[in-house]
Image: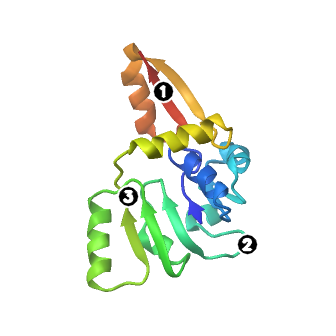
């Protein structure tokens, strides 16, 4: 499995949950976060700005069965070159382009799939995640904490796309 943006708010959890499922994980992140992402459970970590990181090439030469895509602006051709013949890309940040690609893949009966992820939190799933945190099996990474009066500042940091982990706003 490949996880893009593995040091971000979603990617950090994807890496840890996949490790709990005994997956072999390749992850991308910025150079400053490589050690963090390894500590979360990634087997291979790529600096997303390096040539192999831009190309999403696994250092071990593996192709991916699944790519958990938590970043923006990576073209389908980059994913396709690194997927197994029936590989899937789960896009956690789907936009209009993703939806158009999904439609195209459906009508052409493509074996490699792009799956937009839309979530609706369920109580039992959130309780399961809380249980994992309490047991020390899932470790939240907190980038920063902002008072509610500085929510605009927190939002700007989130939109910047370079937070390491979650950005919290407290009342």
Q: Nearer the viewer, residue 141 or 154?
A: 141
Neighbours of disc 1 within 10 Å: few (<14), some (14-19), many (20+): some
Residue nearer the viewer, 84 or 5: 84
Q: Is residue 164 visible?
A: no
Closer to the camera: disc 2 or disc 3? 3
Which comes sooner in the sequence, label 1 or label 3? 3
Residue assigned mark 1: 168
Identify whether 4 is placed above or below 67: above
Quadrant in the rendering for residue 117: bottom left
Quarter of the image for residue 101 reads bottom left
In this rendering, is residue 56 above or below 5?
Answer: below
Residue at image coords 73%, 72%: 60
User: Reading the chain from its start, which is encountered first: label 2 or label 3?
Assistant: 2
- Callout 3 secondary element: loop
- The residue wearing badge 3 is 117
Can you tell which of label 2 and label 1 is closer to the viewer? 1
Quarter where residue 130 is shown? top right
> Which residue is located at x 61 percent, y 37 percent?
133
Q: Between marks 1 and 3, how big is the CA–CA gap? A: 23 Å
Q: Which element carries disc 2, helix, strand or loop?
A: loop
Q: Characterize the local packing of mark 2: few (<14), some (14-19) or many (20 or more) Cα atoms within 10 angstroms.
A: few
Q: Marks 2 and 1, Cα distance to the nearest angstrom?
A: 36 Å
Asked if disc 2 and disc 1 are in contact, CB closer than 8 Å, the reply is no
Would residue 151 appear left or right of 34 to someone viewing this image? left
Q: Which mark is residue 60?
A: 2
Image quadrant in which the N terminus is located? bottom right
Q: Is residue 72 visible?
A: yes
Please name the residue shown 48% across and 53% down the image: 70
């Amino acid at each position: 499995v490949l996880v893009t943006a593995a040091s971000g708010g979603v990617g950090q959890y994807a890496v840890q949950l996949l490790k709990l499922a005994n997956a072999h994980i390749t992850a991308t992140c910025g150079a400053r976060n490589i050690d963090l992402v390894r500590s979360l459970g990634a087997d291979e970590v790529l600096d997303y700005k390096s040539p192999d990181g831009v190309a999403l090439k696994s250092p071990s030469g593996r192709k991916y069965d699944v790519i958990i895509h938590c970043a923006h602006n990576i073209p389908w051709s980059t994913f396709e070159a690194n997927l197994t013949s029936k590989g899937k890309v789960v896009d956690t940040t789907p936009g209009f382009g993703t939806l158009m690609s999904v439609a195209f893949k459906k009508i052409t009966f493509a074996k490699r799939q792009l799956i937009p992820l839309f979530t609706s939190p369920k109580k039992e799933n959130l309780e399961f995640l809380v249980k994992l945190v309490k047991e020390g099996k899932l470790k939240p990474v907190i980038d920063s904490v902002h008072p509610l009066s500085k929510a605009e500042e927190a939002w700007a940091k989130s939109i910047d796309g370079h937070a390491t982990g979650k950005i919290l706003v407290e009342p």
